[in-house]
Image: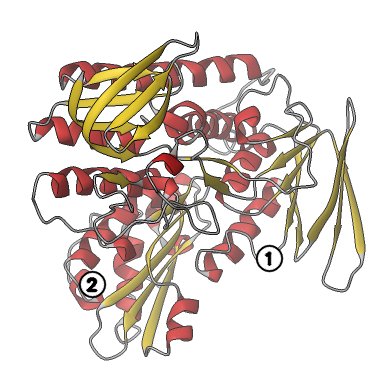
């Protein structure tokens, strides 16, 4: 069968690309290695982790804050199996939704490993070894990423685990050691800390969530310490040794002093790497860089002129919504349109509690570039809505150009900032000034008032409720 476009990979980038191609009138196919559509994000990433984060937050509130609200409970306990089962139900629901969207948009689905024979032919080998040849005018590689590790770490998937196994544990760890202080480690560490586990984080850098503004890392660390986290920052892991029931992690600080941390589980969460094995890239002359990413031009075209690549397999933030934007972008480029993506305005979120959200430049980046800027911050503690909900941990920080007042970066930590950050994205897409936001009415009482107040603080230090 011949197609106008064939997409390899059905994660958020791939399935969105396929839908947009179909909307534009192209005969479209999608190839997925596994039995369910949705990729890492829907099956073993974004969606299941958020399901467990919500469940664990409900339990934590029931155990620690309900009494203050006048809600009294007896015999409170965790049913981890039910939490995992509910998570599986959520995953089933959202992946079934992708199946529906493929049918609705008349996209043909092939299950199996897709590999290029040549630039217009993709061989699909299913689990039984049956081979199907797909002829295509254009192709989009959207195969995503997989957990990265260190060469000397043996991930046995029992005691030394990745994020995939952390979503399926049969027991609450007594002491979970997390290698890596990034987004995945902090989110999954939060899940089990809320359920009663001791969590120790070993991170090579001096801050957690090191890619975000340093203020956010410092504030998040304070909140996680209250949750029971231990931190070994500026420590290089030198050895991970697992037995049938325990794990020992050895790490050394910058002075060369050795630390030994013992637990019953070790989550390795040092990032992710592009998944390109078995694609047959060598058959179509597609090259990867020193980090295994596929090289593309400004239109996301690879060195094969009819093959595009999007999402985690190319440079840039490994975020589902970044892949989605690129999926739409490529579909419209193929259709002869001239879309654009402003990579500086793709927001990032950490779904701990408090949530951390950011868009634009960090204060460290502004300092490094030498750009003159001004800063305004506003604490959640001064918000009526935060006091009412007992979510007073957090702040909003706004960075604006010193001369023009244009907003250059917004960094938030607090309740519901994952939803609030979109206002900052909209403002920055239209190149709003801090004064513009300061002049807009925000409903009272809401968390979003903190954004307005931070903008007031950035313009002549005139926050009203500080």
Q: Quadrant of residue 148?
A: top right
Please tell me which residue is depicted at 26% across the width and 62% down the height of the picture. 342
In the picture, which quadrant includes the N terminus? top left
Q: Residues within 10 Å of mark 2 (few under 14, many from 20)?
A: many
Residue 251 spot, x, y in % from top left: 85, 57
Q: Is residue 337 rendered to the left or right of residue 223? A: left
On the image, the x and y values in percent for residue 337 come to 8, 51
Residue at horizontal 55 percent and vertical 50 percent from the top: 183
Instruction: Tell me which residue sits at (65%, 51%) in the image.
Output: 224
Q: Is residue 225 above or below residue 217?
A: above
Picture disc at residue 237 = none
Q: Position of residue 311 (x, y in %)?
A: 38, 46
The local secondary structure at tag 2 comes to: helix
Residue 9: quarter of image:
top left
In the displayed structure image, the side of residue 139 where residue 104 appears, left or right: left
Q: How is the image coloured?
A: secondary structure
How far across and how far down the image is residue 184, in percent? Answer: 57, 45
Looking at marks 1 and 2 on the same chain, the residue that comes earlier in the sequence is marked by: 1
Q: With respect to residue 399, does 105 lie above or below?
A: above
Tell which of 52 and 393 is nearer to you: 52
Left or right side of 354 for 417: left
**Depth check: 26 or 89 in front?**
26
Tags 1 and 2 touching, CB below 8 Å: no
Callout 1: 10 Å neighbours few (<14), some, many (20+)?
A: some
Of residues 363 and 346, the one nearer the viewer is 346
Find disc 2 in the rendering and name its residue: 438
Q: Residue 43 versus residue 438: which sits nearer the camera?
A: 43
Mark 1 lies on a secondary structure that is loop
Q: Does residue 37 sit above or below 342 in this rendering? A: above
Quadrant into which the C terminus falls: bottom left
> Mark 1 sits on what residue?
205
């Amino acid at each position: 069968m011949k197609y106008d476009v064939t997409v390899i990979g059905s994660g958020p980038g791939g399935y969105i690309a396929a839908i947009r191609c179909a909307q534009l009138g192209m005969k479209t196919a999608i190839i997925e290695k596994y039995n369910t559509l949705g990729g890492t994000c829907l099956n073993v990433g974004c969606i299941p982790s958020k399901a467990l984060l919500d469940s664990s937050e409900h339990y934590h509130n029931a155990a620690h804050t309900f009494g203050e609200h006048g809600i009294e409970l007896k015999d409170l306990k965790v049913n981890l199996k039910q939490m995992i089962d509910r998570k599986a139900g959520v995953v089933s629901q959202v992946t079934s939704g992708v199946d529906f969207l493929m049918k609705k948009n008349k996209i043909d689905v092939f299950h199996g490993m897709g590999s290029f024979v040549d630039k217009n032919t993709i061989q699909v080998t299913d689990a039984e070894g049956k081979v199907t040849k797909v002829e295509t005018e254009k192709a989009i590689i959207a195969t995503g990423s997989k957990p990265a590790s260190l060469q000397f770490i043996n991930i046995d998937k029992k005691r030394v685990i990745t994020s995939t196994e952390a979503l399926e544990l049969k027991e609450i760890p007594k002491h979970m050691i997390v290698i890596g202080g990034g987004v995945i480690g902090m989110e999954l560490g939060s899940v089990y800390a809320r359920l009663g586990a001791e969590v120790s984080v070993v991170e090579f850098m001096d801050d957690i969530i090191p890619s975000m503004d340093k203020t956010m890392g410092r504030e998040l660390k304070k909140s996680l310490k209250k949750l029971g986290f231990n931190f070994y920052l500026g420590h290089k892991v030198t050895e991970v040794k697992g037995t049938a029931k325990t794990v020992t992690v050895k790490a050394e600080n910058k002075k060369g002093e050795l630390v030994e941390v013992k637990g019953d589980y070790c989550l390795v969460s040092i990032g992710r790497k592009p998944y390109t094995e078995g694609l047959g890239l060598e058959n179509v002359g597609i090259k990867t860089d020193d980090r295994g990413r596929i090289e593309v031009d400004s239109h996301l075209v690879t060195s094969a002129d009819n093959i595009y690549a999007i999402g985690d397999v190319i440079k840039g933030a490994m975020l589902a919504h970044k892949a989605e934007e690129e999926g739409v972008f490529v579909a419209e480029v193929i259709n002869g349109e001239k879309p654009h993506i402003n990579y500086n305005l793709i927001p990032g979120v950490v779904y701990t509690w408090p949530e951390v959200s950011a868009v634009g430049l960090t204060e460290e980046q502004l300092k490094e570039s030498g750009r003159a800027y001004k800063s305004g911050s506003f604490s959640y503690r001064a918000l009526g809505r935060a006091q009412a909900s007992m979510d007073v941990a957090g702040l909003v920080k706004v960075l604006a150009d010193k001369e023009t007042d244009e907003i250059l970066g917004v960094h938030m930590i607090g309740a519901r900032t994952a939803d609030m950050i979109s206002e900052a994205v909209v403002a920055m897409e239209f190149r709003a000034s801090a004064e513009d936001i300061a002049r807009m009415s925000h409903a009272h009482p809401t968390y979003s008032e903190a954004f307005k107040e931070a903008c007031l603080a950035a313009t002549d230090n005139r926050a009203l409720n500080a």
